[in-house]
């Protein structure tokens, strides 16, 4: 009999819990993908959402949850042989937002997220600017910031009960980052 992978079990629960928040009216799901990369044999599920009341605004902060697993974990699970220390998958959360004052804003964003998450995930911020062809304006008026929360550990079915809290923290982060962006206009 076919047994779903750890990845599949967690994906189903994660996706269902995010859709529950959408049905409650807290968020609006704006995209999702479920990919199997045959070149590297890894799986990736990602779901994008924003606050429900922000769906029509260009400056809405967007959250993206990513669940990944790779060849070693899939093979170890299918072969029932310990090819890795711990069979499971990883989860990362990304927030996409626009900032104007790089040094000041990245510090404030890190503080907001550390207050919510208790300094648990490793936070990185990737700041970029889009320059249109033949329109080089420097410094730019605004920057795109991709904030990544990485937990640097694998999860498995034993962590399924934690997914609701993870989603709640993500929605809370989304709210606080949106308030931050709205006050910086």
Image: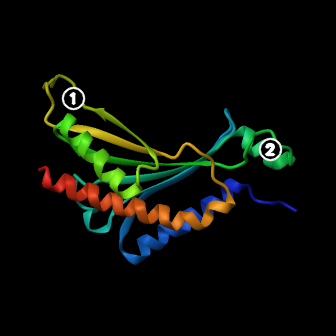
* SS at circle 2: helix
Q: Report the residue marked by disc 1.
A: 132
Image quadrant assignment for residue 43: top right
Image spot of residue 7 (x, y percent): 67, 54
Q: Is residue 83 left or right of residue 178?
A: right
**Residue 168 falls left or right of residue 163:** left
N-terminal-most mark, 1 or 2? 2
Q: Position of residue 130 (x, y in %)?
A: 25, 32
Q: Residues within 10 Å of mark 2 (few under 14, many from 20)?
A: some
Q: Which residue is mark 2?
A: 76
Quadrant of the rendering where the N terminus is positioned: bottom right
Q: Residues within 10 Å of mark 1 (few under 14, many from 20)?
A: few
1 or 2: mark nearer the eye:
2
At a point 35% along the width and 63% down the height, the residue shown is 172
Q: Position of residue 109 (x, y in %)?
A: 28, 47
Q: In this rendering, would 137 be left or right of 118? A: left
Give me the residue at 13% from left, 24% from top. 138
């Amino acid at each position: 009999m076919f047994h779903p992978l750890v990845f599949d079990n967690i994906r189903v629960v994660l996706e269902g819990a995010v859709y529950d928040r959408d049905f409650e009216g807290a968020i609006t799901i704006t995209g999702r993908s479920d990919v199997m990369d045959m070149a590297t044999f890894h799986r990736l599920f990602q779901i994008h959402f924003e606050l429900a009341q922000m769906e029509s605004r260009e400056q809405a902060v967007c959250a993206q949850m990513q669940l990944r697993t790779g060849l070693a974990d899939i093979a170890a699970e299918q072969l029932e042989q310990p090819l890795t220390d711990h069979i499971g998958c990883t989860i990362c959360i990304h927030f996409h937002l626009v900032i104007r004052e790089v040094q000041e804003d990245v510090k404030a964003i890190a503080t907001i997220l550390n207050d919510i998450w208790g300094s648990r995930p490793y936070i990185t911020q990737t700041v970029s600017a889009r320059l249109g062809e033949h329109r080089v304006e420097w410094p730019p008026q605004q920057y795109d910031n991709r904030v990544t929360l990485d937990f640097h550990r694998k999860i498995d079915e034993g962590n399924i009960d934690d997914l609701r809290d993870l989603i709640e923290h993500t929605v809370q982060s989304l709210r606080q980052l949106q308030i931050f962006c709205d006050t910086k206009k």
